[in-house]
């Protein structure tokens, strides 16, 4: 009985050592895969950031261009209104308001 118990203990110990070794190897592989996945996510996030930034840049340029066109149109309207003497208009050339 003691011999059988001892054999079971030795077998269980060997089995658990094998499981620990296997578990450590699996953990190392999992850790490597997690690091690679983390790097891939970081790269994807950086790429997404660049795409967002370039889209924002294009939108800002469009707004700037639209605002410039609007400012030119408003300036033309004010110049015309000031030339006609309409009260409240501002002469863009002088900055003076028509009374």
Image (spheres, grey):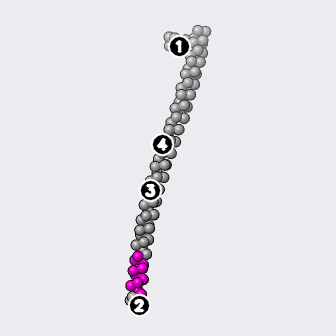
How would you rate the neighbour count of disc 2 (Cα within 10 Å): few for under 14, some for 14-19, many for 20 or more?
A: few
Q: Residue at x 59, y 18 (%)?
A: 73
Residue 76, position in %: x, y?
A: 58, 14
Q: Quadrant of residue 23?
A: bottom left
Residue 44, position in %: x, y?
A: 50, 45
**Is there CB contact under 8 Å for labels 3 and 4?**
no
Question: Which residue bears the numbered disc 2?
Answer: 1
Q: Nearer the viewer, residue 19 or 75?
A: 19
| Of pointers 1 and 4, the one earlier in the residue sequence | 4
Q: Nearer the viewer, residue 99 or 3?
A: 3
Q: Is residue 97 visible?
A: no
Q: Is residue 31 above or below residue 13?
A: above
Q: Nearer the viewer, mark 4 or mark 2?
A: 2
How far apart marks 1 and 4 lie (CA) works out to 46 Å
How would you rate the neighbour count of disc 4 (Cα within 10 Å): few for under 14, some for 14-19, many for 20 or more?
A: few
Q: Residue furthest bottom?
A: 1
Q: Tag 2, which secondary structure?
A: loop
Question: Which residue bears the numbered disc 3?
Answer: 32
Residue 86, position in %: x, y?
A: 60, 12
Q: Tag 1, which secondary structure?
A: loop
Residue 55, position in %: x, y?
A: 54, 35
Question: Which residue bears the numbered disc 4?
Answer: 46
Q: Which mark is residue 92?
A: 1
Q: Residue at x 50, y 41 (%)?
A: 47
Chief SS of the magenta region:
helix
Q: Which residues are magenta?
A: 4-14
How would you rate the neighbour count of disc 1 (Cα within 10 Å): few for under 14, some for 14-19, many for 20 or more?
A: some
**Is there CB contact under 8 Å for labels 2 and 1?**
no
């Amino acid at each position: 009985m003691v011999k059988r118990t001892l054999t079971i203990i030795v077998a269980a110990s060997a089995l658990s050592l094998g499981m620990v070794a296997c578990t450590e190897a699996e953990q190392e592989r999992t850790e490597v895969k997690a690091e690679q996945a983390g790097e891939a996510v970081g790269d994807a996030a950086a790429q997404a950031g660049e795409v967002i930034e370039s889209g924002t840049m294009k939108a800002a340029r469009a707004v700037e261009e639209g605002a410039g066109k609007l400012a030119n149109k408003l300036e033309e309207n004010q110049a015309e209104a000031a030339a006609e003497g309409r009260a409240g208009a501002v002469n863009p050339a002088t900055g003076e308001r028509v009374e």
